[in-house]
Image (tube, grey):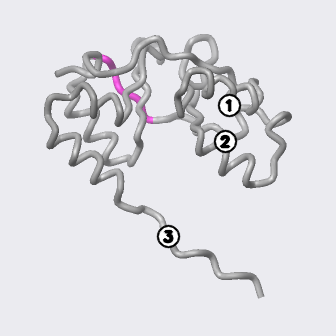
Amino acid sequence: MKVRDVMSQHVRRAAPSDSVVDVAGKMRRLNVGVVPICEGGKLLGIITDRDLTIECVAAGHDPRVCHARDHMTYHPFAIGPDEDLDEALSLMAHEQVRRLPVTEGDGEVVGMLSLGDCAIKCPDDQAVAALLRDLSIPVRSTRPLAAAA
C-alpha cells in the first residue's frame, strides 16, 4: 500500500506571516490539529494545535500579534505519496510524529498522513497498533519541574 492510498488530500495551508489567531481559526473551521506552513506552495514548516497552546498561549504570548513562523516547526519530516506506507509508519514512529506532510517535486504539499488516517484506512491493524505504541513512549521526562526556591 502506498502513502497516497491513505493520506488526506486537499490540505489547507497557511503562510508564515499568518497570525496565530488566524491559524487557530483555520484549524477550528477545518476540524484539524495541524496546518502546513507554505510559501509559494513549498513546505516550510508545520504548526500544530499543541504548538499554539503550549508554545504561544501558555507561554504568555499574544496570539493576535504572533505569527505562524514564530511557533511552527521548521523543516518537518515529510514523505512522498508514492512511498510505501510501511516506510511512512516507520518514519512516524522513529520521529514520534502523529502527522506527516506528504510532498512531491520541490516540496509542494499534496497531502497529510495522520495516525487517524492510518487507523481508518490501513488494513494492517497490527502496524497501526505498533505505531500508536511507539508514539506513546515518552521521550521527555514527565516529572513536574521543581518549584523555584
Q: Quadrant of residue 69?
A: top right
Q: Residues within 10 Å of mark 3 (few under 14, many from 20)?
A: few
- Tag 3, which secondary structure? loop
Q: Which residue is mark 1?
A: 24
Q: Residues within 10 Å of mark 2 (few under 14, many from 20)?
A: many
Residue 52 - label: 2
**Residues marked 1 and 2 touching at CB (< 8 Å):** yes
Query: In the image, what residue type sits under mark 3?
Result: Thr
Q: Which residue range is magenta in the image?
A: 77-81
- Tag 2, which secondary structure? helix
Q: Give percent across and percent down for residue 27.
A: 60, 27
Q: Which residue is mark 3?
A: 142
Give the residue at x 38% y 32%.
114
Q: Residues within 10 Å of mark 1 (few under 14, many from 20)?
A: many
Q: Earlier in the sequence, mark 1 or mark 3?
A: 1
Task: Give the answer, above or below, for where 31 lies relative to 9.
Answer: below
Image quarter hosting the C terminus: bottom right
Residue 83 - label: none
The secondary structure that dominates the magenta segment is: loop
